[in-house]
Amino acid sequence: RSLSVTARESQSDFDSDLALDPNIGDAEANREAKIRALILASLYSNIALFSVKLVASIMSRSLAVLGSTLDSFLDLLTQVVIYFVERCSKTRDRTLYPAGLSRLEPIGVILCASIMG
């Protein structure tokens, strides 16, 4: 009997914590904004790195630098694929996509593995 009372009390405490804390949604939105900012910062830095390597490979005409430029291009391509898949998977249109778009994430991972492999 005491075990069931304790479990019930802990569940009601948990529910009341969720009901009393209106900032839970704000914390999640803040976390999503930080993740998006980091993804965009990484994307912009990869674009800058690829641009510098492209200029260096054109100026030096070195096959080693060209190979590094190609590697940076593939990194940039996979990051763009992951960015768009993540962005599309957030779409919540139940009439157009009844199963949801979260199934795009494994397809994006397979596509990135194919590009890198």
Image (cartoon, rainbow, N blue to C red):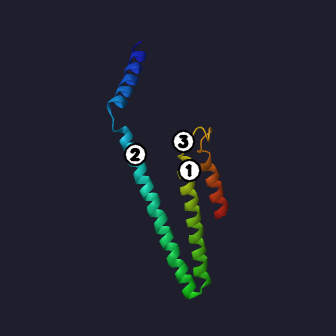
The disc at residue 5 is: none
Distance in Å between CA atoms under marks 2 and 3: 16 Å
Image height check: is 98 above or below 50? above
Check the picture and name the quadrant holding the N terminus. Answer: top left
Residue at 43%, 49% (x, y): give it.
32
Residue type for callout 3: Arg
The disc at residue 88 is: 1
Residue type for callout 2: Ala
Residue at 43%, 16% (x, y): give it.
4
Disc 3, SS:
loop
Q: Position of residue 75 (x, y in %)?
A: 57, 66
Distance in Å between CA atoms under marks 2 and 1: 18 Å
Distance in Å between CA atoms under marks 1 and 3: 9 Å
Residue type for callout 1: Cys
- The image quadrant of residue 15 is top left
Disc 1, SS:
helix
Circle 2 or circle 3, nearest the eye: 3
Which residue is most to the front?
A: 95
Residue at 62%, 49% (x, y): give it.
106
Image height check: is 3 above or below 34? above
User: Which badge, 2 or 3, comes first in the chain's sequence?
Assistant: 2
Residue at 57%, 84% (x, y): give it.
58
- The image quadrant of residue 82 is bottom right
Q: Which residue is mark 2?
A: 29
Q: Is residue 10 left or right of residue 103?
A: left
Image height check: is 47 above or below 93? below
Check the picture and name the quadrant holding the C terminus. Answer: bottom right
The disc at residue 92 is: 3
Disc 2, SS:
helix
